[in-house]
Image (cartoon, grey):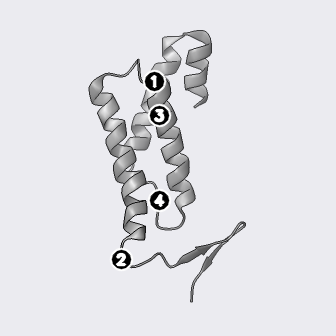
Amino acid sequence: MCLVLAYHLTGNERYIARAWKYAENMCLLEDFNPEITFLDVGELCFQVGLCYDWLYNWMDEYERLYIRQAIFKNGIMPIMDDFDEKEKSNFIISNHEIIKRK
């Protein structure tokens, strides 16, 4: 996120190229870790979504599609699956810790 901001403040292309590499690597993750808490999912969706927004004019259509698909697969689908009639997660999230249900 700082790299994208640096690009917008300076116009230096090296920041945007590096920011794209970070976004691409986040999209390569198998998932955004929804098994324990959706905090990771939300954080990664935020980061990738912000890169999508701030790099939109710099990216080509393939790169835009790549990011949209990663957000859908790793961000939206796990949440939809959790609300379907599938087995619910066995964790309760509190403000300060994760407590496993018994």
**Three-letter code, disc 3:** Tyr
In percent of width and height, residue 44 lies at 51, 46
Could you say whether the residue bearing mark 3 is in a helix, strand or loop? Answer: helix
**Three-letter code, disc 4:** Asn
Could you say whether the residue bearing mark 1 is in a helix, strand or loop? Answer: loop
In percent of width and height, residue 36 lies at 52, 67
Measure the C-alpha gap from mark 4 to mark 1.
25 Å
Could you say whether the residue bearing mark 2 is in a helix, strand or loop? Answer: loop
Marks 2, 1: nearer the viewer: 2
Could you say whether the residue bearing mark 4 is in a helix, strand or loop? Answer: loop
User: What is the quadrant of the N terminus in the image?
Assistant: top right
Q: Residue at x 55, y 10 (%)?
A: 11
Marks 4, 1: nearer the viewer: 1
Marks 3, 2: nearer the viewer: 2
Q: Residue at x 44, y 31 (%)?
A: 52
Q: Residue furthest bottom?
A: 102
Residue 59 vertical position relative to residue 34 in the rendered view, above or below: above
To which residue does mark 3 refer?
Answer: 22
To which residue does mark 4 refer?
Answer: 33
Residue 85 vertical position relative to residue 49 in the rendered view, above or below: below
Q: Residue furthest top?
A: 11
On residue 73, which mark appears? none
Q: Specify few, some or many for label 4: CA neighbours under 10 Å numbering under 14, 14-19, or 20 or more.
A: some
Marks 4, 2: nearer the viewer: 2
Marks 1, 3: nearer the viewer: 1
Q: Quadrant of residue 69?
A: top left
Q: Residue furthest right?
A: 96
Sequence-wise first label, 1 or 3: 3
To which residue does mark 1 refer?
Answer: 55
Q: Residue at x 47, y 62 (%)?
A: 34
